[in-house]
Image (cartoon, rainbow, N blue to C red):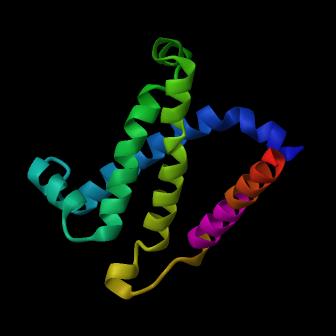
Amino acid sequence: QILRQILPLRKEAGISVFLIICFHAIFHFARMDVLTDLLGIYEETWGNNWVVIIGTIAFLIMIPLFLTSTEKAQKKMGYQFWKNLQRLSHLVFILSAIHVGFVDYPEYSEVEPLPIIFLTLYSAGYFWLFWRKQKEKK
């Protein structure tokens, strides 16, 4: 029952998450004092911190998802191509959970358990759906 009420809000949730991530990046770059330095931003996002690189990849994947989140884009691209593109949001979720869960790992060797728990539940849910679909095919 609750899922039926939440699922229609996926597009709005995705747009909101994208905007939150934009602000997260802006504040991070400001804190690192590279907000107006393109080379500094590049070094901060693609440097030697694998956790930040994963977050950057998730953000870059979100850009086309955000830009194609309208009905007009869906009609122009064709539903199937649009749907396949939007399925990349699953990859964004996985990468984001890893990014948040391991954000303190490079410096403090600490893992934040809650995002990893959510990722585990998410994976278990998809495994269950996959198993159920395979069972229905037989």
Can you see residue 117?
yes
Please give the name of the residue rendered at 55% of the width and 49% of the height, measured from the top-left corner.
90
- Give the tally of numbered discs: 0
Q: Is residue 54 above or below residue 70?
A: below
Q: Position of residue 117 (x, y in %)?
A: 64, 72
Q: Is residue 92 above or below residue 78?
A: below
Query: Which residue is at the front of the view, 21 or 98?
Result: 98
Can you see residue 23?
no
Q: Position of residue 99 (x, y in %)?
A: 43, 65
The residue stretch that appears in magenta: 115-125
Left or right side of 135 for 30: left
Q: Quadrant of residue 50?
A: bottom left
What kind of secondary structure does the magenta stretch mostly adopt?
helix
Q: Is residue 51 above or below residue 34?
A: below
The N terminus: image quadrant: top right
Q: Position of residue 11 (x, y in %)?
A: 60, 33
Q: Residue furthest right?
A: 1
